[in-house]
Image: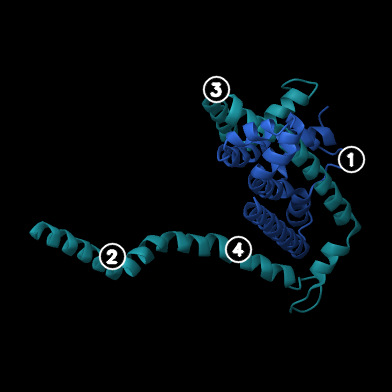
Chain colours: A cyan, B blue
């Protein structure tokens, strides 16, 4: 009898203390990441937004302008580069899907014991620094070996 | 082979392969193997099984993989620098922004182009997210 009351009481106290301590605790825990986010992500982003509409030194006087956007959009070179980038990304994406879908299917339904091994190999291959991977490809594709 | 479009595509594809495989793997893990047996009983060949059962059920994972990979690929500048070199048609958006800011010193246009890319990525992500969600409701 008393034990039931105790348990109920315990539940109530934890609930109440949880409700009271909720705000302070969560704010305390989130303070560091939120500060980090504001200082290291949001501030540079806002500086970049300001920079994109600021009139720069060669043109006389300060003030704000949208001419940078106009230049970025109308420049012929930018259009060519955009088409190139989209083409390269789309072809690479298609190639990746053509490899990834059968690979995932094999891992889930057919691999059995080897599933973990393949998963580990995939993750380990990704752990390598991107630049190192690109250097490796440079060596593989190049004609001069490591030179 | 090096310093060509092919080299850039090959390197990009292998670099991001993990990010494509893991989400698709995760969604496929949730598929009940019995649906394949059922479709086989109903007379579906492997192509029909893939097209009508596997791909629709794995579609949310495929869309997530596309967001995860497409956006970093649009801004990648190291790959095309190292294996693309100065070849025709390998100059990518990330390189353009970097060259505008660090070489030409044109901070305004670089920042504008960067924000346009960010907006485009956001739209792409929203569309992809929407597609993935819609599909989950349908199936």
Quadrant in the picture for residue B46 = top right
The numbered dot on residue A18 is 2
Same subunit, tags 2 and 1: no
> What residue did someone put label 3 on?
A114
At numbered mark 2, what does the secondary structure look like: helix, strand or loop?
helix
At numbered mark 1, what does the secondary structure look like: helix, strand or loop?
loop
Q: Chain of mark 4?
A: A
As drawn, B45 above or below A48: above
Residue closest to the far right: A76
Tell me, yes or no, whether the two marked residues, 1 and 3, touch with CB atoms within 8 Å: no
> What residue did someone put label 4 on?
A44
- Mark 4 or mark 3: name the one nearer the start of the chain: 4
Quadrant in the picture for residue A41 = bottom right
Residue at the spot 89% in from the left edge and 40% down from the top edge: B88
Give the distance between the C-alpha atoms of the residues marked 4 and 3, in whole angstroms. 45 Å
Residue at the spot 64% in from the left edge and 48% down from the top edge: B60
Frontmost residue, A44 versus B71:
B71
Q: Relative to B137, is A33 on the left or the right?
A: left
Residue mark closest to the camera, 1 vs 3: 3
Q: Position of residue B70 (x, y in %)?
A: 71, 47
User: Is residue A9 visible in the rendered structure shown here?
Assistant: yes
Q: Position of residue B130 (x, y in %)?
A: 67, 58
Q: Position of residue B15 (x, y in %)?
A: 67, 36
The numbered dot on residue B88 is 1
Residue at the spot 74% in from the left edge and 77% down from the top edge: A64
Crowdedness near tag 1: few (<14), some (14–19) or many (≥20) residues, C-alpha within 10 Å: few
Give the distance between the C-alpha atoms of the residues marked 2 and 1, in whole angstroms. 63 Å
């Amino acid at each position: 009898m008393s034990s039931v009351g105790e348990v109920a009481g315990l539940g109530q106290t934890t609930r109440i203390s949880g409700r009271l301590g909720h705000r302070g605790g969560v704010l305390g825990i989130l303070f560091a990441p939120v500060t980090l986010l504001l200082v290291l992500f949001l501030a540079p982003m806002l500086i970049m937004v300001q920079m994109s509409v600021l009139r720069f030194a060669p043109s006389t006087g300060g003030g704000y302008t949208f001419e940078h956007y106009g230049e970025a959009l109308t420049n012929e070179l930018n259009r060519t580069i955009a088409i190139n980038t989209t083409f390269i990304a789309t072809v690479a994406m298609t190639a990746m899907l053509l490899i990834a879908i059968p690979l995932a299917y094999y891992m889930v339904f057919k691999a059995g014991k080897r599933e973990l091994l393949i998963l580990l190999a995939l993750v380990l291959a990704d752990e390598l620094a991107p630049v190192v991977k690109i250097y490796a490809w440079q060596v593989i594709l190049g004609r001069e070996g490591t030179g | 082979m090096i310093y060509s479009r092919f080299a850039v595509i090959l390197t990009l594809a292998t670099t991001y392969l993990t990010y494509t495989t893991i989400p698709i793997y995760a969604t496929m893990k949730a598929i009940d193997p019995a649906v394949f047996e059922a479709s086989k009983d109903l007379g579906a060949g492997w192509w029909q099984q893939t097209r009508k059962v596997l791909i629709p059920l794995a579609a949310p994972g495929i869309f997530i993989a596309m967001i995860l990979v497409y956006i970093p690929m649009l801004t990648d500048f190291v790959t095309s620098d190292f294996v693309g070199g100065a070849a025709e048609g390998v100059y990518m958006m990330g390189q353009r922004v970097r060259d505008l800011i660090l070489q030409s010193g044109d901070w305004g246009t670089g920042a504008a182009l960067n924000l346009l890319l960010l907006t485009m990525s956001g739209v792409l992500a929203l569309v992809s997210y929407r597609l993935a969600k819609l599909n989950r409701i349908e199936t």
